[in-house]
Amino acid sequence: MARSEGLSEEIVLECTQPEHFSNPPASQHLDFSEIIEQTYPSSTQRQRVSFQFEDICVSVTQKSLLRKRREEKVILQNVSGAVHSGQLLAIMGPSGSGKTTLLNALAGRLSASGNFGASGRISVNGKRRDPVVFKKVLSAYVMQDENLFAELTVEEQINIAASLRLPRDLSKESRESRVEAIISELGLVEAKKTLVGSETKKGISGGERKRVSIGIELVRDPSLIFLDEPTSGLDAFNAQSVVNSLVCLARKNRAVLMTIHQPRSDIFSLIDSLLLLSEGKVLYFGPAKEAVAYFSQLGYECPLHFNPADYILDLIAVDTRSSKAEQTSHARLKFLHEAYKENSCLQEYFKEEEAVWKSYETMNAFGKSVEDLEKHPCPYWKEFSVLLNRAAKLLIRERNITRIRVFQTLFLSILIGLIWLNKGRNISSNNYEDIEGVLYYILISTTFTTMFGILFFFPSERLIILRERSSGMYRVSAYYLSKTLVEIPRTVMFCLLFCVTSYWMVGLRDSAKNFFLFFIVVLLTSLTVEGIVLSITAGVAKFEVASALTPLAMNIALLFGGFFLSNANIPNYFVWLKFSSFVKYSFGALMHNQFVNFKFQILSNTCVVCDGNEVLKDSGISDFSFWGNVGILFMLFVVFRIATYVTLRISGPKHDNTL
Ligand SMILES: Nc1ncnc2c1ncn2[C@@H]1O[C@H](COP(=O)(O)OP(=O)(O)OP(=O)(O)O)[C@@H](O)[C@H]1O
């Protein structure tokens, strides 16, 4: 990583290493610890930690597809190890060996990903960890996928995290210098004003994205950092620069624990301790630089000029190409596991480790008891204003999306206007059904444009919220209220644009009052659809499932909305669907608005339906009055907004306190 330009010499320091490691210094950075001294109350300053785990066993209960009964699958068996401040520990192993499960178990996030059972002991500085202190003060977890807002700059992302996560008594200047220090420490100075971007929008590089994710977690200055595959998806250069940053973080008195799949030799050489897993069992835990010598001692010599990580991974992988090769690999793994259990040198390594943590202060030195820890670092109003500001910024910056929505709204409304041009100005007993058709089509169009507007964007935002909530950044209500307040004006604008164009082109009832009521119904319909889509997408983890369920819900609502099926055609056992369809109330309200006491322009002597009231009677829309329909629609809007809030709350991140 290059030295950041513009930094004065005196604040650029080398990453120093603890004496017992021989890796070269990884990078040069602004001295973060000095800034921490100045910006953090002394009671919460970073402490040296020794994190130990013993006999971790994890199994998952799953339903067997064939035998239709529950089966227990063992994922980890008696895994032990430790990592201390100053060290980078890598958990390495073939795919499916249990690396992520181990990392999640150690970070207290096992229940987040399945129906797991776990046993074992996890302690910090010799004491059983307190889950609350561990989660809120001591540790940070960087997920494999960087869930970041594409439209915010690097600096904004870290700044928002700092505003929401740092203690309320910290001054603005201190917070800003903390953010600057993190940006500098992670080598993001040149990228700090660049938008993060996404797969479809050019932004910062993959390595920088990863470092932004780390930076967001660093604002609380954790002593222990967990990272799930921080190099996955990165090219060789970026992967190395990320691991360099991690070594540097470790050298500043943090313990860093990461999973890694297949590191290049230069990355492997940066790792301090190595824990090798295969089929959930430990085959090696010790200094990374001694791993090759250890395996050659056991008769598995690494060929000259071979990447040691590749060699080790080949050695501990199961070859499934033939049953004979599989048997041979299993025999080798059994031998390696037994050899590890009996190896006295590696057991000595554990004893040395014990000596290190015994020299550290105890857990209580973190200065905060569970009772002292505030549930949320910021007061509600601050959370709300930071999130409101962020939501507004995102909305303004999503210019392309807004432009496309404006185009879509205008296109559809003009199309409707042209197809039904002036039809409303000449309603007679012969053509009143055309007006029913246009009113219903307006609802179909509103439903689908609103649905897709949410369906394609909210699932990725949901992942960001989950990440932010998993580190207790804010209350769900503060997020949801700010989002709702920012998005409602946008919905109002689109609905107004749509209604102004289509209403007057079609020539619906010629009065400002009727236009306004028409607009209210379309707006309430759009807001109700938003609520339904949000509550489905908030509760469903997979986009594929949400994108199947949402159109299904909309289709049912439209089918039973009162236009396609008359009451007589709805089987008794489906009547409840009619009453639960929001479209029925929207359509009822639009029909009342258009036809109550409406006199036809042209009357024929033979007409069966001769005025608006008869239209309402004929179409079976008269169960509720205009205000009755609007009242129910409003109630549905409120119910689905509350449902979204409840779903967001119950489908939030899970932490476990078992280990
Ligand atoms: N929720 C779950 N239900 C059933 N099996 C699971 C679950 N989570 C993990 N497993 C199984 O546990 C084993 C270990 O999974 P894990 O994701 O920890 O491995 P990994 O080493 O991280 O793999 P990769 O490198 O491919 O990410 C795998 O066989 C996986 O199928």
Image: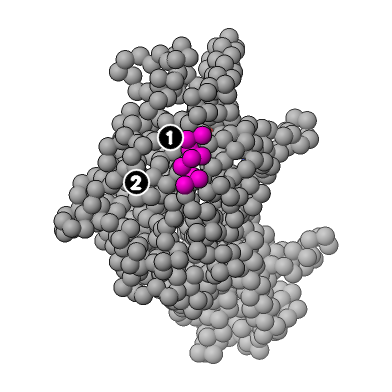
Q: Which residue is painted at 45% across and 66% down in the image?
A: 43
Question: Where does the N terminus fall, quadrant-wise?
Answer: top left
Can residue 530 be spotted in the picture? no
Q: How many marks?
A: 2
Q: Residue furthest right?
A: 572
> Mark 1 sits on what residue?
273
Nearest to the observer: residue 116 or residue 256: 256
Q: Are marks 1 and 2 in contact (CB under 8 Å)?
A: no
Seen from the viewer's position, the closer of residues 286 and 301 is 286
Instruction: Give the mark nearest the N terminus, 1 or 2.
Output: 2
In-front residue for pair 240/630: 240
**Residue type, label 1:** Ser
Image side of residue 494 versus residue 155, left or right: right
* Residue 488: % across, % down: 49, 75
Magenta stretch, main secondary structure class: helix
Residue 414 is situated, as x and y percent measured from the top left of the image, at 43, 70
Q: Which residue is mark 2?
A: 251
Q: Position of residue 524 (x, y in %)?
A: 58, 76
Q: How is the image coloured?
A: one colour
**CA gap, disc 1 and disc 2:** 14 Å
What stretch of residues is rendered in magenta? 351-359
Q: Which mark is residue 20?
A: none
Residue closer to the observer: 521 or 57: 57
Amino acid type at circle 2 is: Arg
Which residue is at 50% across, 21% downward? 316
Q: Secondary structure at mark 2?
A: helix
In the image, 565: left or right of 263?
right
Q: Residue at x 69, y 67 (%)?
A: 581
Give me the residue at 55% from left, 67% from top: 373
Q: Secondary structure at mark 1?
A: strand
